[in-house]
Image (tube, helix red, strand yellow):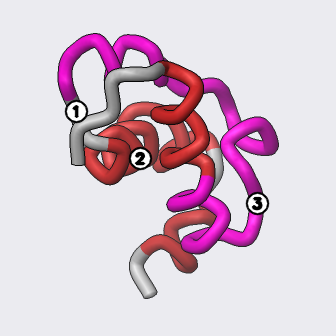
């Protein structure tokens, strides 16, 4: 999925996180969303990177939900 608009990209990332975790990206530690966007990552890839880069160690309770 290619999204050329930053706002739509963030909305798509937020939707994925909401479906997976039940909270939005604004409820979690900051991730480098615009860097992921500029690097050409899909929203799904960006969410996976945010998990690995930010949430994995900072929010251990997410690990249980993420891997289910």
Label 3 or label 1, whichever comes before in sequence order: 3
Q: Are marks 2 and 1 in contact (CB under 8 Å)?
A: no
Residue at (47%, 49%) from the top-left corner?
A: 56
Q: Which residue is mark 2?
A: 47
Tag 1's secondary structure? Answer: loop
Q: Are marks 3 and 2 in contact (CB under 8 Å)?
A: no
Tag 3's secondary structure? Answer: loop
Tag 2's secondary structure? Answer: helix
Q: Is residue 34 left or right of residue 35?
A: right
Question: Residue 34 in the image: x percent, y percent?
Answer: 45, 14
Please, what is the dominant secondary structure of the magenta stretch?
helix
Gap between marks 3 and 1, in whole Å? 21 Å
Residue at (67%, 42%) from the top-left corner?
A: 25
Q: Which residue is mark 1?
A: 41
Q: Quadrant of residue 3?
A: top left
Q: Residue furthest bottom?
A: 68
């Amino acid at each position: 999925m290619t999204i050329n608009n930053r706002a739509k990209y963030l909305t798509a990332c937020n939707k994925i996180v909401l479906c997976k975790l039940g909270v939005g990206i604004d409820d979690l530690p900051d991730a480098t969303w615009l860097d992921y966007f500029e690097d050409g990552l899909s929203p799904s890839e960006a969410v996976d990177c945010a998990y690995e880069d930010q949430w994995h160690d900072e929010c251990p309770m997410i690990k249980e939900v993420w891997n289910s």
